[in-house]
Image (tube, rainbow, N blue to C red):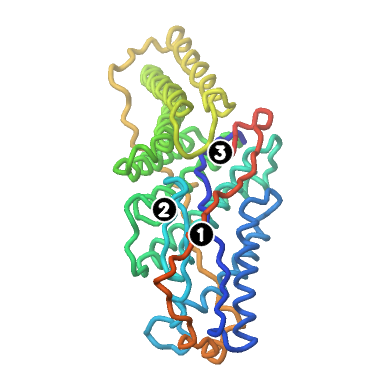
Amino acid sequence: MTHWFHRNPLKATAPVSFNFYGVASTQAASKICSDLRSTRARLLELFTDVTCNHEMMKNATDAYFSLLLGFINSLDGGTQDNKLRYIQNFKWTDTLQGTAPSAQQDAVYELASMGFNVALWYTKYASRLAGKEDITEDEAKEVHRSLKVAAGIFKHLKESHIPKLITPVEKGRDLETRVIDAYTVQCQAEAQEVTIARAIELKHNPGLIAALAYETANYYQKVDHALSSLDPIYIGKWRSYTQLKMCFYMAYSYCYHGQTLLSTDKCGEAIRSLQESEKFYGKAEALCKDYGQTKGPGTTAKPSGHLFFRKLGALVRNTLEKCQRENGFIFFQKVPPEAPQLELKANYGLVEPVPFEFPAMSSQWSPETHADFDLTKRPKDDNAKPKKEEEVKPMKEPDVKLQKDSGCQIS
């Protein structure tokens, strides 16, 4: 597998102590606060741990979220907000807008922000696996599944939790609809790239490969459309990626469509399809240069030098030469002036997000332990003494060096 995926930085967050002195009035309540602090810290550590795998991440997320949900869900079956929902302030940066954090005193904001980072981890985990020199079939399946899991998390946050925020999400921030839609669809597109690579490896019907490539190009076009109305300062590099991938898979689609036409003796149309493939490949090559020169969040790479890119160029040239050679010796067909219209629909291999749900609330929570948090004991805010702003330091993400012919470099 020779894939290269653009990745934006992880979200960073300020430390949270969960020290509710006086409010947590019993040992059981204090234990919950201590466990919240430790499970949150552990989860943040794993985001940048290159040894972390799917199972470790699942265990860590379940441990933290099962406790955090005691600040959000109702324990008495009522419809009123949980009394603990607004007790703690949370600060998070965004993947696109640098180190300036946003803050909300709302446990739902923490749930959505941390969940967003978990989804990002799955995308980076997939990239790390895809960048291995000798990736196994099981690892390829893990890449595919991880991207679908990430898409499912993004989708779940958008539909079930972000709408519950009291403070509206600022435009261009991670939890805003356009941004989260872009991340969701990009995960689907990248998972489909894995499907295409598998179909090519197993020498599936060129018509199926052409249809899958066409659907994947459309996914990237949707991502680009979602990003198009955001500030270009923040998303210029990301859009270069989506546009070059869109052109890349249009080139793939026309190339394999040309093979289908050739197999039915439509050599003139096949040549025109391959010429269109060559044109899209040229556009992708130009966009590769734009990507490398564009400043902004994301991966540092020269995609035109990656094996995944070079292999397609050779395939397009060789297939076009074959069509022209056979047309000159056998078919003598005219080459149409217009490129064939691609009205391709894949019946197999289309990617859907894996449905996601947060874990059940921890057994440490009960109506009794919830009652042990006495909000009347909260210290009064002393507005005369301004509080020192907690610095939000960027995540120290590991440098994953480019491996031989892997086509991947992870930010």
Residue 362 in sight here: yes
Question: Which three-letter amino acid code belongs to the residue tagged 1?
Answer: Glu
Q: Position of residue 65 (x, y in %)?
A: 56, 70
N-term mark: 2 or 1: 2
- Residue 225 in the figure: left or right of residue 407: left
- Residue in the picture at 41% in, 65% down: 104
Q: Which residue is mark 2?
A: 174
Q: Nearer the viewer, residue 229 or 96?
A: 96
N-term mark: 2 or 3: 2
Q: Nearer the viewer, residue 73 or 5?
A: 73
Category of crowding for the residue at label 2, using alpha-carbon neighbours closer than 10 angstroms: few (below 14), some (14–19), many (at least 20): many
> For residue 341, what is the image quadrant?
top left
> How far separated are the C-alphas under marks 2 and 3?
34 Å
Category of crowding for the residue at label 3, using alpha-carbon neighbours closer than 10 angstroms: few (below 14), some (14–19), many (at least 20): some
The disc label shown at residue 199, or none: 3
The disc label shown at residue 362, or none: none
- Residue 300 in the figure: left or right of residue 283: right
